[in-house]
Amino acid sequence: MSSFGAWLARERELRALTREDVARTTRLPPPSVAALEEDRFDALPGEAFTVGYIRSYAACIGLSADEAVLRYREARQAGEPAQEPARASRPLLPRALLAAAGLLLAAGAVGLAWLRLWRH
């Protein structure tokens, strides 16, 4: 069985389209079109974008977008795990610190307002 990217390239070539045609029609960056056809998913910006790129690519060459995404997911499941967006891998500690700082600022504002009201 050929790879997902090879399948996309073959389907594009059967329709006498070039990578440049696909990039121009879909407005995808040419390196992203190449990355899709070469199974270099790590060169793409993230899973959600990759799926969107595949949908656009499929629609451009006349394939079912749903079928293309299904084939992509099957290929990824058989190989490496799907990539996660970069922000999903960040530790939660900075977010917790930001929330705590926000609560402290809110408590300070409430305390200041109460103090001003109490003085009058």
Image (spheres, grey):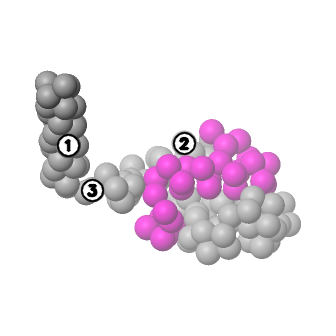
Under mark 1, the amino acid is Leu
Q: Front-most of 58 and 16?
A: 58
- The magenta segment: 39-66
First in sequence: mark 3 vs mark 2: 2
Under mark 2, the amino acid is Leu
Residue identified by numbered label 1: 105
Residue 75 in sight here: yes
Between disc 1 and disc 3, the foreground one is: 1
Q: Residue at x 14, y 28 (%)?
A: 119
Q: Is residue 45 magenta?
A: yes
- Report which quarter residue 65 is drawn in: top right
Residue identified by numbered label 3: 89
Q: Is residue 30 magenta?
A: no
Give the spatial CA distance, label 2 vs label 1.
48 Å
* Image quarter in which the C terminus is found: top left
Q: Position of residue 95 (x, y in %)?
A: 23, 49
